[in-house]
């Protein structure tokens, strides 16, 4: 008997606050098992398909290692490896994969694709990021917050930057569900859409989370327990780079902004990858063209003791393991557990 068995995780609102909290706590438990070298083969003999239309370091690695730790076999199917979208429809691909694999991860562009895979495959589907949501990232992020502060309810997380991307959407809605106050500081044209705001407001009315959407970074960071940012241009976005940089420069996480939280205990988060120095090809190009050595976060803050970005990245693996084990594993979670 497993309450979660057969569920997909396509967006944060697929689960209740109690279910999300369970997954966070289960991820923390699985992390301890791994640290103590205690095996946890909840998915022995299972086969997992990993579909990627967009590149990935963390999500791909996390799904691969988590599947192996759980005793399953992961199979990577990149955009040039399969027919999806070119010679074969999403529905046909879903039917075929569902007949062979026990679970499917999808990272790509349209939310509709991951929804269709879930509708037509007959197996659990996990959203490894679409243009709209990044739900597996949320279990890791809120797990990181819980590990650090020992609680979630009543914390304040401020996101600064592009307030309309997948990560901003997911943070706003997840925080609202879990009773974490979420502040977003973004230019007027990059605020969350009305639809995302409506979902978040509905959840906040139930959890008591206080939400603040502002164009003023100083006001939004005041009292924040965590500052969070993400890249200014997301994968697949076609925008005028110079214009986007100009628009978002006032929203950079730097020493001054960090000090404006008014507390020394504030932690700094980023889902990664981050442009915090000129050590990458893109970073070098930006430095040459715009005379900037960092975009959304300065290296000084990224590398400071307040930054938890690499703990957060590691937690992707534990979180994804919890999600896969819960929705596909042979666990005892009574079906009335969350009533
Ligand atoms: N944070 C995250 O999803 O990283 P990747 O794009 O490397 O998977
Ligand atoms: N918003 C970013 C997140 C990367 C993990 C993107 O979609 O590129």
Image (spheres, rainbow, N blue to C red):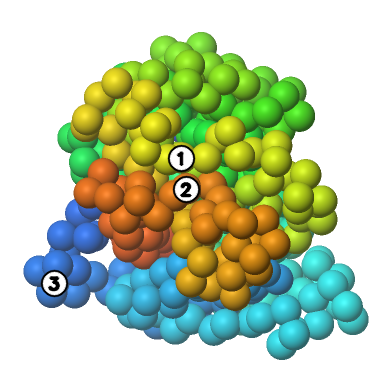
Q: Quadrant of residue 21?
A: top left
SS of the residue at dot 1?
Answer: loop
Marks 1 and 3, how far apart at CA: 39 Å
Closest to the camera, between mark 2 and mark 3, is 2
1 or 2: tag closer to the N-terminus: 1
Report the residue marked by disc 1.
Answer: 253
* Residue at mark 2: 297
Expressed as whole percent of the image width and height from the top left, the position of residue 331 reads 30, 58
Q: Are marks 2 and 3 in contact (CB under 8 Å)?
A: no
View extreme (left): residue: 36
Q: Position of residue 224 (x, y in %)?
A: 35, 25
Are discs 1 and 2 less than 8 Å apart at CB?
yes
Q: Residue 173 occupies which quadrant of the picture? A: top right
Asked whether mark 1 and ligand 2 are closer than 8 Å, the reply comes as no
Q: What label does residue 38 carry, if any? A: 3
Name the residue at 44% across, 83% down: 73
Seen from the viewer's position, the closer of residues 71 and 83 is: 83
Secondary element at tag 2: loop
Question: Where is 142 relative to 128, above or below?
Answer: above
How far is disc 1 from disc 2 in space, using C-alphas? Answer: 5 Å
Q: In percent of the image, x 27 and y 50: which residue is there?
A: 304
* Other-residue count near label 1 (Cα within 10 Å), few / some / many at <14 / 14–19 / ≥20: many
The residue at label 2 has a CB less than 8 Å from ligand 2: no
Asked whether 178 or 157 is in front, the reply is: 157
| Other-residue count near label 3 (Cα within 10 Å), few / some / many at <14 / 14–19 / ≥20 | few
State the residue at coordinates (23%, 60%): 30
Q: Is residue 143 left or right of residue 54?
A: left
């Amino acid at each position: 008997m497993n309450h979660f068995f057969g569920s997909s995780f396509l967006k944060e609102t697929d689960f209740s606050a109690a279910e999300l909290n369970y997954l966070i706590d289960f991820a923390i438990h699985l992390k301890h098992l791994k640290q103590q070298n205690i095996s946890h083969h909840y998915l022995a003999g299972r086969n997992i398909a990993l579909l990627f239309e967009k590149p990935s370091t963390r999500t791909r690695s996390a799904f691969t290692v988590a599947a192996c730790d759980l005793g399953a076999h992961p199979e990577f199917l990149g955009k040039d490896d399969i027919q999806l979208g070119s010679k074969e429809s999403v529905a046909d691909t879903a039917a075929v994969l569902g007949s062979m694999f026990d679970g499917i991860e999808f990272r790509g562009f349209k939310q509709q694709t991951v929804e269709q895979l879930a509708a037509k495959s007959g197996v659990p589907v996990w959203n490894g990021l679409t243009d709209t949501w990044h739900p597996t990232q949320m279990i890791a992020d809120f797990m990181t917050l819980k590990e650090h502060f020992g609680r979630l309810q009543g914390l304040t997380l401020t996101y600064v930057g592009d307030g309309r991307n997948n990560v901003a959407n997911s943070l706003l809605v997840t925080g609202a569900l879990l009773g974490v106050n979420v502040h977003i500081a973004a230019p007027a044209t990059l605020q969350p859409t009305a639809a995302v705001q409506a979902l978040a407001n509905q959840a906040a009315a139930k959890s008591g989370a206080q939400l603040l959407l502002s164009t003023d970074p100083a006001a939004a960071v005041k009292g924040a327990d965590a500052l969070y940012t993400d890249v200014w241009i997301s994968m697949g976005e076609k925008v005028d780079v110079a214009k986007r940089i100009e628009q978002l420069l006032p929203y950079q996480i730097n020493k001054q902004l960090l000090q404006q939280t008014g507390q020394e205990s504030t932690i700094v988060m980023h889902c990664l990858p981050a442009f915090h120095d000129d050590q990458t090809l893109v970073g070098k190009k930006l430095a040459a063209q715009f005379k900037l050595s960092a975009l959304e976060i300065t290296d000084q803050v990224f590398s400071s003791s307040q930054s938890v970005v690499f703990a957060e990245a590691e937690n992707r693996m534990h979180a994804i393991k919890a999600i896969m084990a819960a929705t596909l594993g042979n666990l005892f979670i009574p079906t009335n557990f969350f009533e």
